[in-house]
Image (cartoon, rainbow, N blue to C red):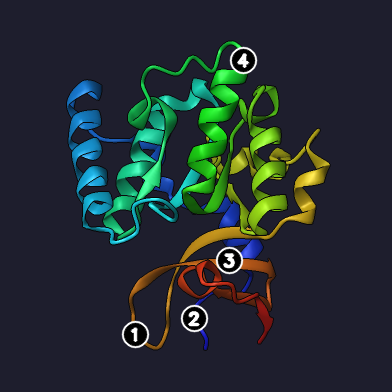
Amino acid sequence: MSFNIQDLRQKAETRLFSEIRKASGMPKPTAEKLINENNRQRIFDSKETDVNVYDIFLSHSAKDAQIILGLLDKLNNLGYSVYVDWVDDPQLDRSNVTKTTANTLKTRMNQSKSLLYATTEHASGSKWMPWELGYMDGEKDRASILPIFESESSSSHSFKGQEYLGIYPYCIEATQQKTGINKLWVCEASDIYITFDEWLIGKKPYKH
């Protein structure tokens, strides 16, 4: 399977979800409500109510709420149900590390098929993101880095101070050449990749 990207890593660093950073033009509470309802409908339609309710557990910094709002909308539109704590569990307070919050997040990760770790300039300061990444990787081996950059010029600095992220695959959006449809791809290198849907069901990136 091939698609029209020469260097997946470069594309991930320069154009991945570029429109996400603009988020939506509507007021944040209105957008939250619409996205929440969309997400809930997808979950309601799921036949599995105890596990795999969510396709994606979106690990992110609380300081990136507006970016995450746009990302959630994007992922919903691509057909994925996504867990975001302040949308689905607004009672949680991630500013404080407590056993109750940790247990709730564990439950949500157990209900999710995968985790996407949204990297931004705030990610390295998050109390929860490294823990969420390690937990999901250990439990399900379905954790991937989702590079998000404030500007193209900042892309080369994205992983400074977070070298351990390099051991995980990364996720990008790209057009499948055969169909012309935008899809998510999970990549280990520019020539080692697989569609996100295949990765979700347990397949691994392979060399092309």
Q: Mark 1 or mark 4: name the one nearer the start of the chain.
A: 4
Type of amino acid under label 3 = Val
Rendered position, 34 above or below 56: above
Q: CA distance from mark 2 to mark 1?
A: 9 Å
Classify residue 40 as left or right of residue 90: left
- For disc 3, the marked residue is 186
Type of amino acid under label 4 = Thr
Q: Which mark is residue 179?
A: 1
Q: CA distance from mark 4 to mark 3?
A: 32 Å
Q: Mark 2 or mark 4: name the one nearer the start of the chain.
A: 2
Residue 130 on image: x %, y %: 70, 35
- For disc 2, the marked residue is 3
Q: Nearer the viewer, mark 3 or mark 1?
A: 3
Q: CA distance from mark 2 to mark 4?
A: 45 Å
CB atoms of marks 3 and 2 within 8 Å: no
Residue at (72% x, 43% y) in the render: 134
- Give SS at disc 4: loop
Residue at (72% x, 56% y) in the render: 168
Residue at (49% x, 78% y) in the render: 4
